[in-house]
Image (cartoon, coloured by chain):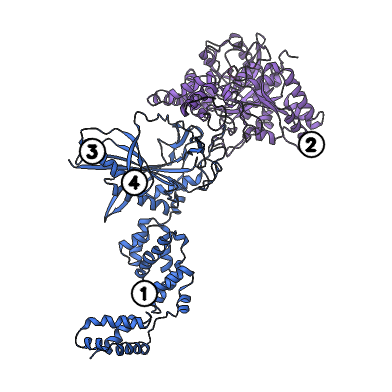
Chain colours: A purple, B blue
Amino acid sequence: MSETLAELVRGLAAGRYSSVELVDASLARIRRHADLNAFITVDEEAARAAARAADQARGAGGTGLLLGVPLAHKDIFCTAGMRTTCASRMLAGFVAPYDATVVARLRAHGAVMVGKTNMDEFAMGSSNETSYFGPVRNPWDPTRVPGGSSGGSAAAVAAGLVPAATGTDTGGSIRQPAAFCGITGLKPSYGRVSRYGMIAFASSLDQAGPMARSAEDCAYVLAAMAGFDDRDSTSSERPVDDYIGGLSGDLAGLRIGVVREHFGAGLDAEIGAATQAALAEFERLGATLVDVSLPNSAASLPCYYVLAPAEASSNLARYDGVRYGYRAAGYRDLEDMYKKTRGEGFGAEVKRRIMIGTYALSSGYYDAYYLKALKLRRLVADDFAAAFAQCDIIAGPTAPTTAFALGAKTDDPVSMYMNDIYTIPVNLAGLPALSMPAGLAGGLPVGLQLVGRYLDEARLLRVAHRYQQATDWHRRRPPLS
Amino acid sequence: MEWETVIGLEVHAQLSTRSKIFSGAPTAYGAPPNQQANEIDIALPGVLPVLNREAVRMAVRFGLAVGATINRHSVFARKNYFYPDLPKGYQISQYERPIVEHGRLAVDLDGDTHVIGITRAHLEEDAGKSLHDAIDGLTGVDLNRAGTPLLEIVSEPDMRSSAQAVAYLKTLHTLVRYLEICDGNMQEGSFRCDANVSVRPRGESRFGTRTELKNINSFRFVERAIDYEVRRQIAVLEGGGSIRQETRLYDADRDETRSMRSKEEANDYRYFPDPDLPPLLLTDAFVEDVWADMPELPAAKRERFCAAYGLSRYDATLLTATRELADYYEGVVAGGGLDPKLAANWVSGELLAHLNSAGLDLAATRVSATALAGLLRRIADNTISGKIAKEVFEAMWTDGADADRVIAARGLTQITDDGAIEALVGEVMAAHARQVEQYRCGEEKVFGFFVGQVMKASRGKANPAKVNEILKRKLAP
């Protein structure tokens, strides 16, 4: 399990090991590191059966892109037959009758699902502490958070429990935990990956993506996930680039935008230094650095914390206790049933955001909050468009700090929200971005964020891959047995 | 004081698409509860809506038929509220940017034509149904109807009486069925109506405070509910009170309206654009394609029936009431050689009477247009008289036989031979010598008696014109 996913793909093809062996090894590590609490549900029997089927398929000449590779899904993707909880009491016993498109596509490419990873409840959080199933621990330091909301996927990949996992990213939920756990995670352009069967948090921002040990690994998983889906009206019909074939190439002539505003107050000095070192490395590899500005990025946070809760307040209205999911035990009438069910079924952060969003959409406040936030969103997107007139990608820190201690920010939501200051503008603009390891600060991983033009995932992956060929930060492993 | 009534109507027409507006589940009526609701209709976690192209075509077809603006850019919004029959906790509807705006509908009433403005028509999804006390005192939820496409058609407050409102509603009802976008079945809720009603002193230009009447699901109830509400409002105002803006429910059993909720109690629906559905963009080519597919509309068909068949406005209106009836009529006259007026009388008379008394739709008629044409041709060529034709029609209706077979089997062919009729006349005159004497003395009114006797003797088969002619000749002194 020390190999990268790309290496495992080649090893399986060469017959150096079977899928059953890989899946058994993965399941054993999941058991050994149960303390990390990275998984909500693991079905060992189903995983072994799928591995046997993959081995048989290979014996019969089958050649799926990920045939036999163990993989975990964030517990936000619906999986037929295995419960999908979204880390909420509300859905603790919910079993979907269908697979999310992402799940179906990865299965069709031969991947073997070993289980469902922990996360912040309904993907609302930056520390994985809002999960109904308890917090996830960071493999680099179990007293620290793994980041969120895809904290379980990040910890599972960092700890070597699985070579890759899926995540979702609404305001940084793939990139920030990837940074905190020292792995590579890619949030694709809005519309590149189908959202069908992925439980909605904020529909206009949510996007699924791969989390793995390297850019190359992400290219494999994204190649299997991406593409138009006629069940998602917001998915793009544009053809998918060849991410794996597109990995090779040098950085000569590449213009990298360095965002002035990224290096202001609030950025940890060691992270700033690691970022500068990575930029210097890019220059050494042939890229040129260009000074760019995103003047409205300061407005991103308030903009996001109106739009995302507004959409969430509506998206989460279906959890009413009527048709499925949690229903409170004793109630007087319909309204009492709604109140008790939602009061007991949702955690504090989810309820906070539902209330914020309901307020923002209310008659008399809509123009002042929701409509104004939509205008700000346009300004943020315009900033990126202007910046990309001068550069090909943008590079900077993924998060202003490294992984913080469990409990350090749970009583201070605004300070928690500030952790996504560099990632949120990218979601507002619908652009692709990845985070990859670019150093250590106080023994903890530092993430470097690369942002690309719309649907320019292939270039992002190529640049990251080139960097990873020249450096070994992505090969550093947490001190685990 | 003299009061003026002001009425605007909101009609929900269920579009006759095969599948739902945002899912692939079927829309057929009457299935067992929850058998026609898929994961999208019951709003499982993670599902997404995909717009039904046919529903869009139907909305555009309606818009073109009422001369409206077809918005090339329209937006779906979420209308948020909690109710057990609303699975997502919001209804997807068009709010600020509907697909159809600024149309009009010409409505005939008592010889006058009123042009009623259509403010807008927008696409939305229907909710499910709550089944109260369905299961041992519990409330059940049936989501078969959830996601059925609706076109909500909102009129301007242009109507001034309940009769006008009913006339508008009937004209609209005819139109949507002509367009084949709605089956118009009011019992099954395919065509539902809410009415906004207010009164004001005649001559006043500002509107009075309106109430919205819900649950009026037949033309008759629309008229009665509005009439009741107008009387109620006038009584309140004349008693020195004021009207509360509120929603009122019509109770057909007690023929009254009751307050349901006031404006203050109304939900804050928190509308916002649905992020799961991009704006609906229509190309000119799409709209032109729908235009090319338009059937002849009721008003145009009525004019054509007047012009092409020389029918009265009354007959033309009657025969174009539904597309099916108009098609039937044109099927009868298609072969040519028939008097269009005669055909009109038979279709609107004998045929409709038989359908009505048998409780059948035109589609289930036992006498086809071709068969009726065959019967009328025998009247035209004097094989049978109009009176005998009714007997033949009766037999055709009962046995499904064609006219010629009935005529032959029953020996009903008209007697036109002069000799045969002269013989009958001779017998009758011989048997009624006294009446012959009376006639010849100038009592001409007994002529009718002789006609009756001759026809009776021929068992109705003698050609009446010939009977007249021969009788006149023979009775002459």
Mark in the foreground, 4 or 3: 3
Q: Which residue is the site of mark 2?
A: A56
Mark in the foreground, 4 or 2: 4
Residue located 43% across and 44% down the image = B151
Q: Which residue is the site of mark 3?
A: B235
What chain is tagged by disc 2?
Answer: A
Distance from disc 2 to disc 3, alpha carbons, whole Å, reads 84 Å
Distance from disc 4 to disc 1, alpha carbons, whole Å, reads 41 Å
Callout 2 touching callout 3 (CB < 8 Å): no
Residue located 37% across and 88% down the image = B420
- Same-chain status of marks 4 and 2: no
Viewer-proximal residue among A450 and A208: A208
Task: Give how far across and how far down residue A299 sits, in percent.
Answer: 47, 19
Task: Give how far across and how far down residue B103 sits, in percent.
Answer: 35, 46
What chain is tagged by disc 1?
Answer: B
Residue type indicated by callout 3: Ala
What chain is tagged by disc 3?
Answer: B
* Position of the N terminus of chain A by quadrant: top right
Quarter of the rendering containing residue A247: top right
Is residue B423 at least partly visible in the picture? yes
Q: Which residue is the site of mark 1?
A: B387
